[in-house]
Image (cartoon, rainbow, N blue to C red):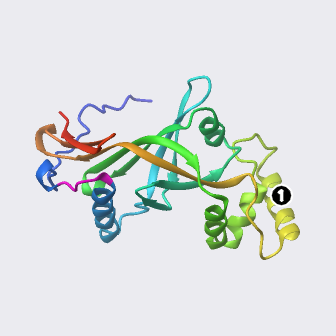
Amino acid sequence: MASRDLNHLRSDYKRGALDEEHGAADPVTQFHKWFDEALASELPEPNAMTLATVDADGQPSARVVLLKSFDDAGFVFYSNYESRKGRALDANPRAALLFFWPELERQVRVEGTVARVAPVVSDAYFATRPLASRIGAWASPQSQPIPGKAWLVARAAEMGVRHGLSPGRPPHWGGYALEPRRVEFWQGRPSRLHDRILYSRGDEGWRLERLAP
């Protein structure tokens, strides 16, 4: 197979700008603004984010999950607590999120500590999920080896019969909230002179500064 030349795959970003004077006083307000613009632009899955974790052995891993809510307390997502990400977060509750909206030439990086949300919050969200997704949460031993696809289909059918039309939340499944300590907003700019505005949380609140691209 002929090798592909990737050296010339690049774009010159020109869609927007971000400066310190026009940034919000705190990153959650700024994120709300950008997220609303991503929604208005009808991007595919604007709430998709890469979650990076590090396990007890220091091994990093990353995967895409979906943001389900956010406020000053944290960015919330849901998962199986016994999955690889769940085990990593049990061992090391520090993580990072990355949102990438290429159509808007924007990235948002969020770093902080992660904790499970209250069971009542997980219960309320679980009840909003489609029935098939609720059954799937019972059926899938996430991140564990399984005999094959047919086994998983049969397991889902078994859980459907067992739990009926109103399955409650499995005890091994629920939400996490990442409390932000650092949030960086990246806006692509021409000639690789990108705008990078960093919010860092200290004892006296949020500090805002520009980073070199």
Q: Is residue 169 left or right of residue 8?
A: right
Kind of residue at badge 1? Arg
Q: Using the image as rendered, state which of residue 33 and residue 182 is in the foreground.
A: 182
**Seen in the image, is 23 located left or right of residue 29?**
left
On the image, the x and y values in percent for residue 157 come to 83, 65
- Mark 1, other Cα within 10 Å: few <14 / some 14–19 / many ≥20: some
Quadrant location of the C terminus in the rendered image: top left
Taking the spot 77% from the left edge, 69% from the top edge, the residue there is 167
Q: Is residue 155 visible?
A: yes
Secondary structure state at the residue bearing disc 1: helix
Kindly give the residue lying farthest to the top in the view shown.
57
The answer to which quarter of the image holds residue 90 is top right
Relative to 166, does residue 178 appear above or below in the rendering?
above
> Residue 88 placed where, x, y %?
61, 35
Q: Residue furthest front?
A: 204
Residue 12: in magenta span:
no
Q: Quadrant of the N terminus?
A: top left
> Residue under circle 1?
155
Q: Left or right: 103 with respect to 131?
A: left
Q: Position of residue 66 (x, y in %)?
A: 51, 56
**Foreground residue, 207 or 156?**
207
Q: Is residue 173 above or below residue 63?
A: below
- Residue 197 visible in this rendered orientation of the protein: no
Identify which residue, 152 or 209, lies in the foreground.
209
Q: Position of residue 44 (x, y in %)?
A: 41, 63
| Residue drawn where x is 20% and y is 35% of the image | 211
Range of residues picked out in magenta: 23-27
